[in-house]
Image: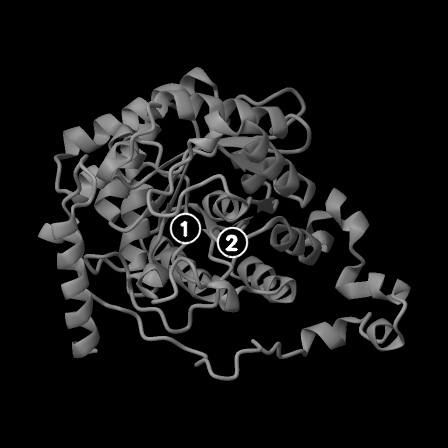
Amino acid sequence: EEMAPGKKGILERLNAGEVVIGDGGFVFALEKRGYVKAGPWTPEASVTHPEAVRQLHREFLRAGSNVMQTFTFYASDDKLENRGQNLRLSGAQINEAACDLAREVASEGDAMVAGGVCQTPSYLSCKSEIEVKAIFKKQLEVFMKKNVDFLIAEYFEHVEEAEWAVQVLKTSGKPVAVSLCIGPEGDMHGVSPGECAVRLVKAGAQIVGVNCHFDPMTCVKTVKMMKEGVEKARLKAHYMVQPLAYHTPDCNCQGFIDLPEFPFALEPRILTRWDIHTYAKVAYKAGIRFIGGCCGFEPYHIRAIAEELGPERGIMPPASEKHGMWGAGLEMHTKPWVRARARRDYWENLSPASGRPTCPSMSTPEAWGVTKGHADLLQHKEATSTQEMKHVLEMQKMAKSSA
């Protein structure tokens, strides 16, 4: 691994048993700030609003993140042109700008740059292995040109496509991490987490795990299953977890995109910083050492991971100067009843209310059961037609009546 002088690489850190803290969910965070469009979820802001992307990187770095992931989620050309998206920007332009921003901020602290690829519309549309791999190769060219520190293949629902991504990224000679967006039930074709992990390690990944789609506890449980599978096969790997910052006890195998609240009404499910302390503790105890976040994770969530694992890491993040451990800063509050909350047992034992008396605490996932190989998942460049919209609304009605 070649790193900036004096900086340790990802494998060097993990081999030494160090904790590597990931960053949070860029797509969701920037959507809420007005720089990403929900639906296509593409990262053109790296080119159009670099200051917004740079600032978010800085906030995660300040909160304790050791990994600046390039803001390249869904930046493959097939995704940039999907369903009427007309950006007049190529994947290469976006990816180059994203690499420059991540590198600029990483150099301001103790962070590495990770170039990321994720699942493609081409795979969902049943394109061939050669066609799908060509998309990853094109993205990898930019990451090589920009000399990222390591590579992450993340957000894969099907282990087969993730294997293809790992095989391509592996040719770089750089460390490869891979994370699937699956839960304990396995990938969308029912391949168990243990088997998925074994296949990915055999494909050449040094770090395996899960990201997105499920809440922290579900993700940790899934990574534990991966670890068991890898150990049973007498293979070796490091483990990563980058979950949602949303509680999803009601999810099925498709994760939170199946919840009726996705994506514009998830706020009642957000984890508090104290929930994150529990997550960090449990992930660490499970032997996971690359611990970060995905959609819903804001800088204060990442800071909570850094604070919880402060004793293990021997360091506190810069953002902790504005945060007393376990609410200690409240001792400075003007109101006496708020000062009384400046203690760990108060926050650890609180059951926060949602303030929504007429709402249920759980939802019913939609469960259309549509995945790769299904006609409704064929993607195209043209905008979604009125006819297609009519069809999905009928499907929605049918799904609701059968639920």
Total residue callouts? 2
Task: Kindly tell me whether residue 206 is visible in this rendering.
Answer: yes
Mark 1–mark 2 CB contact (< 8 Å): yes
Q: In the rendered view of the protein, which quadrant contains the C terminus? A: bottom left
Residue 178 in the image, given as x and y percentages of width and height: 38, 42
Drawn side of residue 346 relative to residue 374, left or right? right
Q: Residue furthest top?
A: 145
Residues packed near mark 1 inside 10 Å, few (<14), some (14 to 19) or many (20 plus): many
Q: At 62% from the left edge and 79% from the top edge, which residue is drawn? A: 351
Q: Residue furthest front?
A: 386
Q: Quadrant of residue 121?
A: top left
The vertical placement of 240 against 361, above or below, is above
Quadrant of the image occupied by residue 308: bottom right
Between 15 and 97, the residue placed more toward the observer is 97
- At x 31%, y 63%, the residue is 258
Where residue 214 appears, as percent x and y from the top left, is 41, 61
Q: SS for tag 1?
A: strand
Amino acid type at circle 2 is: Ile
> Residue type at mark 1?
Gly
On screen, residue 133 above or below 56? above
Q: Which residue is mark 1?
A: 209
Which is nearer the N-term, disc 1 or disc 2? 1
Please indicate, yes or no, whether residue 315 appears anywhere in the rendered image: no
In the image shown, does 294 or 280 lie closer to the viewer?
Answer: 294
Say which residue label 2 marks. Answer: 288
* Quarter occupied by residue 37: top left
Q: Is residue 167 above or below residue 92?
A: below
Separation of marks 1 and 2 at Cα, in angstroms: 9 Å
